[in-house]
Image: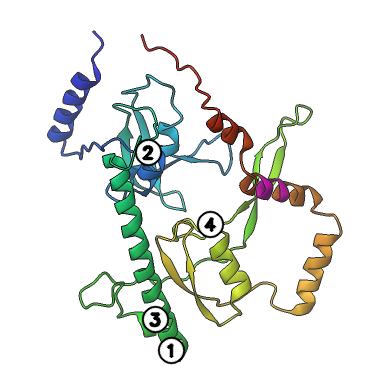
Amino acid sequence: MKLTPEQATTKVKAYADEHQLLYEETALLSQQELLEDDDHRLGRFVYRDPRQRGSGRTVAEDLFSTSTGGEFYPRRIDDRTPTGQVRDWAIYWKLDEAEAYVPEDMSDELVRAEVVKAWRDEQARSVALKRAEALAEQLRKGEQSMVETLGKETVTGQEGGPPLNIQTTQQFSWMRPQFMPSSNPLNPQGFDTFPVRSQPIGLEPVGDEFMRKVFEGLKVGEVGVAPSIDHRYYYVAKVVSRIPDKPEDWEIVRNNFLSGIYDRMQSQMEDEILARNIPRWQDELMREHDVQFRQPVRE
């Protein structure tokens, strides 16, 4: 006999209690909320397809890509370090889902919750930025290393607060090539190469604002503040070295770029920038005319 989600959940809870495992349920969350939920890191666990080198998607992306009616379909996921070591694992599934909707007016409780959250995030960002700027100024005035200067500081600046996480990242570039199985039917064993933004190991996801600061806003030895992609974290960054570091070496890089050697990669970068910045006119048109697609009927 097939168990209902409720019956299966009861059995899973009992199994977790018996084997001292942690069982948790979230409220109904959007994909972005699940990614940002610090109480449930599971949403940020990444599933990597061994058949596709360098690819991966988060649990949140996986849950929101499943078809309607996919409740209680368990999946196993490992949380791995950048070097591939397993540091945690989990089994997850979807218990329920609700269609997206636009609140009728501002009295909707969800609207109030979103407004409160946005206001709190904005206040927290300004406090975090101010603290990061103060630490950066302290580091500029000192003559010692970052560890020696800031090693005893806390995130909040208050005694007993969480300590700063001071680390030296590995060398990284603004963009890096990613390899995917070839889409060319005449060369099925080959790989396609396209550019993606690098992600420094040990940092929260960063965007072009972070990269622009460390690559264009700071010289070697200088200190500055750069945000994560969602501005939830602010990093006090010091550029230790840069390759190449001589003007004549940069001239070689520039000439190679203009020579056409990387025309294909440049074209793909242009496509990515256009796709990110040009409005999705199809979505706007559907929204303007209130186009609704019929959803499959559950049996």
**Callout 4, which amino acid?**
Gln
Q: Give percent across and percent down for residue 107.
A: 28, 41
Q: Mark 2 points at which residue?
A: 30
- Give the spatial CA distance, label 1 vs label 2: 45 Å
Q: Mark 3 points at which residue?
A: 134
Residue name at image x 63 percent, y 37 percent? 281
Q: Is residue 204 left or right of residue 9?
A: right
Display colour scheme: rainbow
Mark 4 vs 2, N-terminal side: 2
**Callout 1, which amino acid?**
Gln
Q: Which of 59 and 185 is in front in this view?
A: 59
Q: How crowded is mark 1: few (under 14 residues within 10 Å), some or many (20 or more)?
A: few
**Position above or below: 67 against 235:** above
- Give the spatial CA distance, label 3 vs label 4: 26 Å
Contact between marks 4 and 1 (CB within 8 A): the answer is no
Magenta residue check for 90: no
Q: Give percent across and percent down for residue 132.
A: 40, 75
Q: Name the residue under label 4.
A: 199
- The local secondary structure at tag 4 comes to loop
Which segment is the magenta one?
A: 270-274
Residue name at image x 58 percent, y 56 percent? 198
Which quarter of the figure is the N terminus placed in?
top left
Q: Residue 144 carries which label?
A: 1
